[in-house]
Amino acid sequence: MERIEPMTPKGVFEYRLPPSKSHMIRELMLASKSITNTEIIFDGTPGDDIISMSNCLELMGVKIKKELGKWTIEPPKNGLIAPKQNINCGNSGTVAKIMSVIAATFESEVTIDGDISLRKRSNTELAECLREMGCEVSGDSFPCTIKGPMKLQNNLEIDVSKSSQPITALILSSSDFKEKICVKLLGKRVSKGYLKLTIDLARKWGFRAELKEDSIELFSWNVKSPGKVKIPSEISLYPMAILLDKLHENLQVKIQKDDSDNLLSSILENLEIPGLKMLDLINASDIITPSAALMAISNGGEIIGVEHSKGKESDRIIKTCELLNGFSMKCESKKDGIILLGKDLPKRPEKIIKTHMDHRLAMTAVILATYCGAEIDDVEIINVTHPDFMNMIKELR
């Protein structure tokens, strides 16, 4: 548990973001399937989700030399090998989905597991997809044991209405596909920017397939390392800095907005519009919690399009409302979003704030607590994305 007392920070404060886990996890996967070494360059400290990805790959024969601001990836000469022990994906759903598909390429059984939070998350869509391709999959959640090898077929359907992670996992593994497979995407797509990111990054490594409306054809391709890749900052944490700035009137938060892949640029611009009344986060559900807090302390409004956020590290609609209510901020949950009344500055909670092992809930709670104070449990979960966060916040005093 962390006890935070109210702060009255003044002046200019540099808010430092960690390297993007979305980028780095994907680049690590691609680097592990190349035939030459790759240097991955970044600023800041990689979070535990990135570390989980690197640990999984090392169990499959990848060598990773980790230095300050630079990792060198040496792929195994004859391709990834089946791990001899269970794969622990920590808190990361993205890593677990990618590892599930990689496990399906091996003839031996591979068990995919993670922390308490990951064990509560569904893997139904991808599990059904792998079974359809002839794999044995022990369950629709984690831990699960997968036995391949998967048998490719001409056509495959996969539901992407809850997450783009299953199709991302298939794309990142498709270089080994011996036959062409047409994957039809079912349901209303969410998190479109992250699927586009997967495709754009893979193209730098030789991927040639194109997404056409609701389908994509996947086929064998040679993974060629660009030699060196630079990881941008974790743009999905930018709203945390905006919230800190808005809470403290004598503080000017300085932060570099690096969104070269246009994942959240338009959404972030909307967040800073005075009098914003409706925010559609269908493609940016990760920022629901700090966005709700921002709307609560300003003029209120409604967040929509985030029904799929119920399947994240926590049910982010319900738990965001619980968090804000704990700080005496009025809100109402809906099936696909949250209604905020507005003009609600946080008040010190009477009870300990629960983070539910969700790093974004925890970061938002800590920032709100800098205004009014609070006791918050399990703040260590913040390390999955932003290991330097708590020390940075302590610099405000």
Image (cartoon, grey):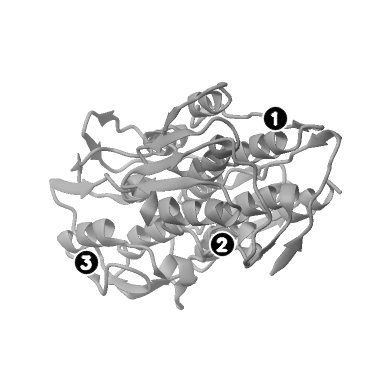
**Distance of label 2 from label 1 (alpha carbons):** 27 Å
Mark 3 Cα shell of 10 Å, populated few (<14), some (14-19), many (≥20)? many
Residue 14 occupies quadrant: top right
Q: Is residue 15 left or right of residue 202?
A: right
Secondary element at image label 2: loop
Of labels 2 and 1, earlier in sequence is: 1
Residue at point 42% right, 38% down?
A: 194
Q: Which residue is mark 3?
A: 135
Secondary element at image label 3: loop
Considering depth in this image, is 134 or 239 the residue closer to the camera? Answer: 239
Q: Which residue is mark 2?
A: 355
**Distance of label 3 from label 2 (alpha carbons):** 36 Å
Measured as percent of width and height from the top left, residue 153 is found at 14, 51
Label 3–label 1 contact, CB within 8 A: no
Secondary element at image label 1: loop
Residue 102 occupies quadrant: bottom left
Of labels 3 and 1, earlier in sequence is: 3
Amino acid under label 1? Gln
Q: Nearer the viewer, mark 3 or mark 1?
A: 1
Residue at point 75% right, 37% down?
A: 248
The correct choice, above or below, for 182 with respect to 203 in the image is below
Image mark for residue 361: none
The tally of labels here is 3
Amino acid under label 3? Cys
Q: Which residue is mark 1?
A: 256
